[in-house]
Amino acid sequence: MIATDTIAAHNEALTSTHERDLAVFAERLDRHGMDAEVLTQRVAAFQVAVPSWALGTGGTRFGRFPGPGEPRNVYEKMDDVAVIQQLTRATPRVSLHIPWDEPEDVGALKAHADDLDLGFDAVNSNTFQDQPGQEHSYKFGSFSHTDPAVRQQAVAHNLHVVELGEQLGSEAITVWLADGSNYPGQMHLRRSFDRVLDGLQTVYDALPDGWRLYTEHKPYEPAFYATVVQDWGSSLMLANRLGPQAQCLVDLGHHLPNTNVELVVARLITAGKLGGFHFNDSKYGDDDLTTGAIKPYQLFLVFNELVDAYEEGLDGFDPDYMIDQSHNVKDPIEAFLQTVDQLQRAYAKALLVDRDALAAYQDQNDVLMAEQTLKAAYEADVSALVAEARRRQGGALDPLAAFRTAGYRRAKHEERSEGKYAPPQSL
Ligand SMILES: [Mn+2]
């Protein structure tokens, strides 16, 4: 991990400027009847899970260009998450993907996590790839497959993932369901859905008390004609039929271009079925780019719905926040630091929305001022606020700068790469 002194020295150097910026910001808030201290505490309480699969360099179907010093196993991935947590104080949990990051010794992984003061968020199952030694192939589906033996294998894998998650202290499973068809006629559209429902019901019935099962929709890829759980409507049908412990997960990138994602979020909140998020961003499809990189206003509008629901005190509203990105050309740790900052900013801005004024403008049908109320919050510079939220908890005022100064990746390059790759240019 990064030496505590390094973070302290980094903060010390920025303190004077930071405190002046914060004072200006607090004064502006005060003029609008808002308390900077209250907002700081709320931003400081924001937490998001880091996915184990995104700590190594990602790739596309065209190739993968490994980065220097990337983690070689799940233990090193946990070490990297601990650094992200150290600098942001917002990522105390890891979302584990099975089997990609399946530990040989569950007790040893749990002990390593305990040493790093990290916990485990939702575990993720995988029935979209064949694993070595696996009896039946998922080439033509898993839960939706026509052969009951394949379906049984998919159910057994999910039960195994739940059992593993229970040992680690997870309280939810996210089912990555890639089932679908590439050509009209290939798959019976209704029966394939029924089979998925049937298989998920078996997994659902075995859920430990207090656990949640997340159904995640996706419009296309890897199936390009008809995905079984293609949109939030199908996801909601599944969650409603399965029972109260089943909820819908919204991956921001799993929508067709121009879909109003904040409206999807609002509908799932109304249905009492918003389980949580996979945060990322996209230009065209499931691009898995850094959250807030392409559509920061959409991200703000999503958080606006979340804050609105939270402030109404809606019964059972408790979404689980997770990141799902692929870092093909960025240093994964740096991308996560950027992501957490973007999430904190979107959340902070959503907290700034004057909800009484907005409600009044909506009632009066004052379109312009209603929009302007949102815009005013979105356009505020919340840099000092989110920096203060991090500093309060021992994190870094500027996590990216602190990370680069600390030389963590260079040290890991020497330790992990065994001279295989060129040293990082940026460090
Ligand atoms: Mn996802």
Image (cartoon, rainbow, N blue to C red):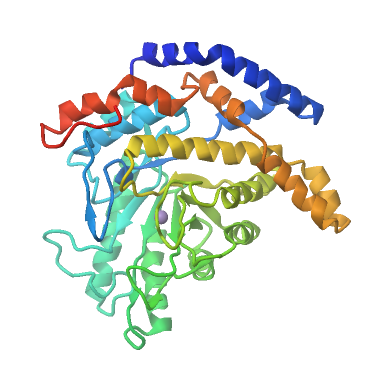
- 276 above or below 31? below
Image mark count: 0
Q: Quadrant of ligand 1?
A: bottom left
Horizontal arrangement in the rendering, residue 21 relative to residue 173 (left or right): right
Location of residue 184 with respect to 326 vertically, above or below? below
Q: Residue at x 54, y 52 (%)?
A: 295
Nearest the viewer among 3 and 187 is 3
Image quarter hosting the N terminus: top left
> Residue 340's x, y, as percent?
47, 37
x then y, percent, for residue 261: 57, 59
Q: Residue furthest front?
A: 425
Q: Residue furthest right?
A: 364
Q: Is residue 318 left or right of residue 63?
A: right
Q: Which residue lies at the image location 26% right of the left edge and 32% below the top edge?
A: 425
Residue 159: % across, % down: 31, 56
Residue 41 quadrant: top right
Hey, which quadrant is residue 24 in on the image?
top right
Q: Residue at x 28, y 71 (%)?
A: 151
Q: Is residue 149 above or below residue 87?
A: below
Q: Is residue 312 visible?
A: no
The picture places residue 58, in percent across and down from the top left corner, at: 28, 49
Q: Which corner quadrant holds the C terminus?
A: top left
In the displayed structure, does residue 266 sit left or right of residue 238?
Answer: right
Q: What residue is rendered at 44% in x and 49% in y? A: 211
> On the rendered structure, is 145 left or right of 380?
left
Q: Can residue 64 be seen in this snapshot? A: yes
Nearest the viewer among 244 and 349 is 349
